[in-house]
Image: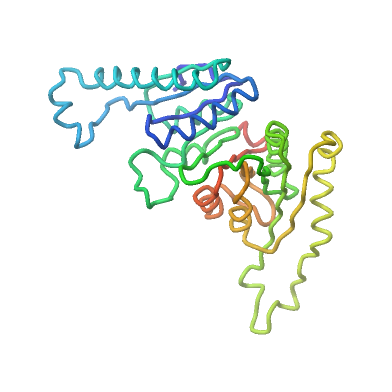
């Protein structure tokens, strides 16, 4: 099954036409305008739409409810298009009304898109629940390129640094490349965070086991600085700070997200960031970060 539009080189943003999705659309539009990329706003409708209870009688009164729903969606997509183009007159914006699961359509488009942007939660998620919604969760897990997740409780801080979780894995280096691109675009510094954590089995009744040597934070900092040094030379006007901290990776990144423009993380990593997408770390960062989060993969991983 293929998607109905060409996403090559574009910034693709999913919407369910809710107020929450507007945050994601606005963030994607700002980025597309800065980078002079096409913006594609995608709304995916199920093959057989099932009306909510509040719309049940409306559906029963329509001879062709799916077509009625499609007409309403096109009308609201046009209104969304008009609003985005009013904010960014120079931006090329396309709207797509596709059939199928939104997560599948967006994940497939990520194979060729510059970036896919999704809201953290859909229109029907309770306000007090911060858990990642099903569509965002699936796109992050199965996407092939950079995926940005924009929450409705966390907003970018103007002038704040771009925070990147960094170790010496290929995935983290891919994250660093995107972090540098974002920092140059926004004209803000990069804050590279490397977190290490004492796992419970390393600590005994007398404290840290003598069999386990504590990490040498100075050497860790030197290693991380070696990774970022080529970017310092390439962008001499760009400030890249390195923080090596003892903390759970998710906690370190969430804390660093306060006052940040965006957080960038690799899909996998060595040491503290292992299994970022597949375990609790990713869910905590994506759920609790105080700003948008970009999740990326190394190029060789993205091809699979």
Where is residue 253? Give x, y as percent. Answer: 62, 53
- Kindly give the residue lying farthest to the bottom in the view shown: 206
On screen, residue 59 versus residue 79, left or right, reads: left
Residue located at (51% from left, 52% from top): 288
The answer to whether residue 205 is above or below residue 294 is: below
Give the tally of numbered discs.
0
x, y (%) of residue 212?
74, 72
Q: Residue furthest right?
A: 233
User: Which residue does the image show at 49% across and 50% down from the upper left?
Assistant: 287
Left or right of residue 71, residue 6 in this image: right
Q: Which of 171 and 237 is in front in this view?
A: 237
Residue 30 position by quadrant: top right
Q: Which residue is drawn at 19% across and 35% down?
A: 54
Residue 183 image-quadrant placement: top right
Please state the horizontal and vertical placement of residue 29, each as a whole percent of the image.
54, 26
Q: In this view, does 4 lie above or below 274?
A: above
Q: Where is residue 179 in the image (x, y as percent from the top left)?
A: 69, 39
Relative to 35, 237 lies left or right? right
Q: Which residue is drawn at 39% across and 35% down?
A: 19
In the picture, the quarter occupied by the C terminus is top right
**Vertical placement of residue 103 versus 261, above or below:** above
Above or below — where is 293 with respect to 86? below
Image quadrant where one finds the N terminus? top left
How is the protein colored in the picture?
A: rainbow
């Amino acid at each position: 099954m293929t998607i109905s539009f060409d996403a090559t080189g574009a910034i693709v943003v999913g919407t369910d036409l809710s107020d929450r999705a507007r945050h994601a659309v606005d963030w994607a539009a700002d980025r597309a305008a800065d980078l002079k990329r096409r913006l594609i706003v995608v709304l995916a409708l199920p093959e057989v739409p099932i009306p909510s209870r509040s719309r049940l009688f409306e559906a029963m009164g329509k001879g062709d409810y799916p077509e009625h729903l499609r007409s309403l969606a096109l009308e609201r997509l046009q209104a969304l298009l008009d609003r985005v183009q009013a904010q960014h007159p120079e931006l090329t914006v396309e709207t797509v009304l596709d059939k199928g699961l939104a997560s599948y359509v967006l994940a497939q488009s990520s194979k060729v898109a510059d970036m896919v942007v999704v809201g953290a939660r859909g229109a029907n998620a309770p306000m007090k629940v911060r858990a990642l919604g099903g569509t965002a969760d699936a796109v992050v897990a199965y996407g092939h390129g950079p995926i940005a997740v924009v929450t409705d409780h966390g907003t970018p801080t103007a002038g704040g640094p771009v925070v990147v979780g960094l170790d010496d894995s290929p995935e983290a280096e891919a994250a660093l490349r995107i972090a540098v691109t974002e920092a140059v675009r926004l004209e803000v510094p990069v804050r590279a965070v490397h977190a290490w954590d004492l796992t419970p089995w390393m600590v005994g009744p007398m404290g840290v086991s003598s069999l386990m040597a504590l990490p040498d934070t100075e050497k860790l900092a030197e290693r991380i600085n070696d990774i970022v040094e080529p970017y310092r030379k390439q962008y001499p006007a760009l400030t890249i700070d390195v923080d090596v901290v003892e903390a759970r990776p998710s906690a370190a990144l969430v804390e660093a997200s306060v006052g940040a423009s965006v957080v960038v993380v690799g899909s996998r990593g060595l040491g503290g960031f292992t299994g970022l997408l597949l375990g609790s770390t990713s869910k905590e960062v994506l759920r609790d970060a105080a700003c948008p989060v970009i999740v990326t993969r190394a190029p060789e991983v993205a091809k699979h």
